[in-house]
Amino acid sequence: MIIPVVLSGGVGSRLWPVSREAHPKPFMRLADGESLLQKTFLRACALPGVEEILTVTNRELYFKTADEYRPVNHSGVGLSYILEPFGRNTAAAIAAAALDLSAAHGDDALMLVLAADHLITKIQAFEAAVRIAADLARQGHLVTFGIQPEHPETGFGYIEASTETLTAPGLGGFKVRRFIEKPDLDKAREYLASGRHFWNSGMFCFQVGTLLKELNQHAPDVLQRVARAMESARKSLGATHRTLELAPASFEQVPDISIDYALMEKSEHVAVVTCDIGWSDIGSWNALSELTPADAEGNRIEGEALLHATQNCYIHSPERLTAAVGLDNLIIIDTADALLVAHKDRAQDVRHIARQLKESGHSAHQHHMTVHRPWGTYTVLEEGERFKIKRIVVKPGASLSLQMHHHRSEHWIVVNGMARVTNGERVFLLNTNESTFIPAGHVHRLENPGVIDLVMIEVQSGDYLGEDDIVRFEDSYGRS
């Protein structure tokens, strides 16, 4: 049995303003309409014998992740989740997954660790590499995947393969000699020429029992503290999924360390499968731009753009027209509430902007204008002193929490569908073009009893319109 473990924890700050804390890189959609997370899920589902996929993610992203999986889970693969209250790096996530799979499937099960936000284009080569890795894992090796470098790269760590071959010639299985930090350009050129150095992909294959044994030997503090966090976790079991939610108080005691530092660099049983699988970590706007064909002037355009005397630019503007005059070698990323203009040579530095926004408390580091919730979405259309206007979409069968606001009143107008409204002591239906007024201090709830999306306009007014002015009494999603 092989169980893919999808790690979905990175923010992707170098891809701001499209990637944000509440809508991180795995949820970014490519030109074909699929998100990176969906592509990872489909790639994992296609592997022979896969009946379950375990996802480790932040608990705030659970419902959004489930929404991403639902339309692409054509084969009905079982879904399991480990929900972290906050990130503790890959060692903690992988240890938690191993303990969960050991309890559910036994120590002989194989786990294939995949990043949620990487792209792999050569699927047959990927599946062949997984088969080799699975064989090595069954023999007691901790297996990582080394990507054949295409150019000298200073943004990746490297794996140096030894000359000791662990598979038949040509299959690419070797003992690992050492892991190497991100090099300077001269070293990267040297590694490219050597033929023994490979990009560290961050993908792994382990037999569960072997991994737990090696963690106990080389990183006992990580394993023991994760085990304690698992014991106090809240568990739920549904017809199609298992969910384990880690409590903050116990999980914050877990060391924040990567699996490379905690284990892979220490163990004597590490193997690498070297491969050419069309891999990219989509780590910057330059990397993402390579997925879009260039025109005769070297420009890559997503959306609508008018260009004059402009060369070698990447413009991502799906929502409105962008015009560029006399530009060269720039990245232009336009979203509804933020615009990024950067030189291509400084694409890695976008993360500094994201960090400044977070440190200043600016909402643009966390949310887009359209914010996803378990029940649907809301979009802020306009706001000013003492008012805010939202477009709210509630999924069929979903409901907002039973709640109350101290400082604001709300006026609801149904645009499409039907709403069931709780307003104080009254419960009633609202049809399209009907409205109701919710005074401040009234307990209220909005539900969609229909089979199509409920779309409504909400007009808020009051002294304070922050999202934290909510007192929840009941909630279908465990937020009360």
Image: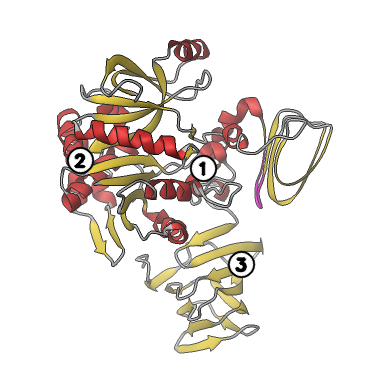
Vertical relation: 266 (above or below) 438: above
Where is mark 2, residue-wise?
208
**Amino acid beneath label 1:** Lys
From this viewpoint, is residue 256 visible?
no
Describe residue 364's horizontal placement relative to residue 180 as left or right: right
Image position, residue 155 (x, y; %):
49, 24
**Amino acid beneath label 2:** Val
> Do callouts 3 and 1 mark residues in contact (Cβ within 8 Å)?
no
Where is mark 1, residue-wise?
358
Query: Does dot 1 land on a helix, a strand or a loop?
Result: helix
Where is mark 3, residue-wise?
390
Disc number lying in front (3 or 2) = 2
Which residue is rendered at x = 15% and y = 29% of the image? 217
Disc number lying in front (1 or 2) = 2
Image position, residue 57 (x, y; %):
37, 49
- Of residues 165 and 241, the one nearer the viewer is 165
- Of residues 133 and 437, the one nearer the viewer is 133
**Amino acid beneath label 3:** Lys
Residue extent of the magenta highlight: 334-340
Q: Quadrant of residue 62?
A: bottom left
Query: Does dot 3 land on a helix, a strand or a loop?
Result: strand
